[in-house]
């Protein structure tokens, strides 16, 4: 495909996935089962788009192939994401951002954690497929891997404005996190570690805040301030050297071509 028509086609597909992922939950109040149907629907839509419009093999072309080590990648990512978010909240506690007066009852904690564990996995996977997986396939097909880190970091920061206010600190935080997430994809060739990092961070967030502002700990005297935003960015930035040390022996994604098993031959398309 010529580069401009290809870019237009892929941009159209990205807009479709983005609107489905971000607009549907805002237009409709979804309970647990409808939300799971919505989440599964996203992957069906991504598969159909990749298979029949972009002429790819499917979700594996978006970095979700079940290659050797994918479970290890997602587990390592979860530990990193959970650990960094735990460190961040520990520092917030020491700084006096909040006080802890106790814990919720087990009857509240266990169902909420079970819902968070499943829901945050799907939410993390949706975002990573849409941002890092989708554009991984594009950059590899169009021989543009040199732009991958910049492109996905920018798109991630802008996409996060669906959920957060469009402010400088939010953009900076998303960019710092986005660089680390994109780096894991460049080094591993898949989005599994990125999903794991997202999943672990989101899980800790739900433990602190739940789905309605109430997590497993009872927080009181919660304060806000720009100092906490700076600390959040700084601690999140610590994730990159951790990931770098873990992946420094890995080979980078080949920038020249898409693996042949990711592309449907034209005579079969």
Image (cartoon, rainbow, N blue to C red):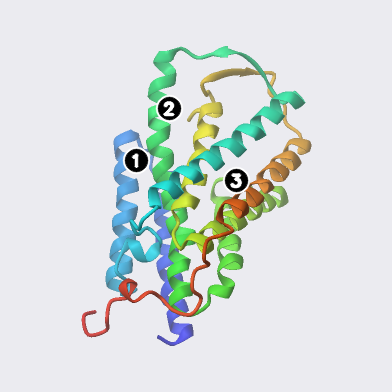
Give x and y (percent) for residue 145.
53, 73
Q: Secondary structure at mark 1?
A: helix
Q: Residue at x 65, y 30 (%)?
A: 89
Looking at marks 3 and 2 on the same chain, the residue that comes earlier in the sequence is marked by 2
Would you say residue 201 is visible in this rendering?
no
Is 135 left, or right, of 98 in this rendering?
left
Which quadrant of the rendered structure holds the C terminus? Answer: bottom left
- Front: mark 3 or 2: 2
Q: In 3D space, how far apart are the residues under numbered discs 3 and 2 (Cα atoms)?
A: 23 Å
Is 190 left, or right, of 90 in this rendering?
left
Give x and y (percent) for residue 156.
56, 57
Q: Residue at x 22, y 85 (%)?
A: 267
Q: Secondary structure at mark 3?
A: loop
Give x and y (percent) for residue 100.
64, 16
Look at mark 2 in the image and give the residue it sits on.
113
Q: Which numbered circle lies on residue 35?
A: 1
């Amino acid at each position: 495909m010529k580069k401009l028509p290809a870019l237009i086609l892929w941009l159209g597909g990205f807009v479709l996935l983005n609107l489905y992922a971000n607009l549907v939950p805002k237009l409709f109040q979804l309970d647990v089962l409808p939300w799971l149907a919505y989440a599964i629907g996203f992957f069906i839509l991504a598969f159909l788009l990749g298979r029949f419009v972009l002429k790819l093999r499917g979700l594996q072309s978006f970095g979700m192939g079940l290659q050797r080590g994918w479970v290890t990648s997602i587990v390592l990512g979860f530990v990193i994401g959970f650990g960094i978010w735990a460190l961040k909240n520990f520092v917030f506690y020491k700084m006096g951002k909040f006080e802890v007066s106790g814990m919720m009852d087990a009857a509240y904690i266990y169902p909420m954690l079970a819902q968070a564990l499943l829901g945050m996995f799907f939410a993390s996977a949706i975002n990573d497929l849409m941002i890092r997986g989708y554009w991984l396939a594009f950059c590899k097909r169009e021989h543009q891997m040199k732009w991958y880190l910049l492109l996905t970091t920018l798109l991630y920061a802008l996409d996060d404005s669906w959920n957060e206010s469009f402010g400088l600190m939010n953009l900076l935080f998303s960019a710092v996190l986005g660089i680390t997430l994109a780096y894991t994809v460049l080094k591993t060739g898949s989005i599994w570690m990125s999903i794991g990092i997202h999943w672990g961070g989101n899980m800790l967030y739900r433990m602190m805040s739940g789905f309605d502002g109430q997590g497993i700990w009872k927080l009181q005297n919660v304060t806000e301030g720009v100092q906490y935003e700076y600390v959040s960015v700084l601690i999140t930035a610590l994730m990159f050297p951790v990931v770098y040390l873990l992946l420094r022996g890995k080979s980078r994604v080949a920038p020249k071509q898409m693996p042949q098993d990711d592309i449907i031959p034209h005579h079969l398309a």
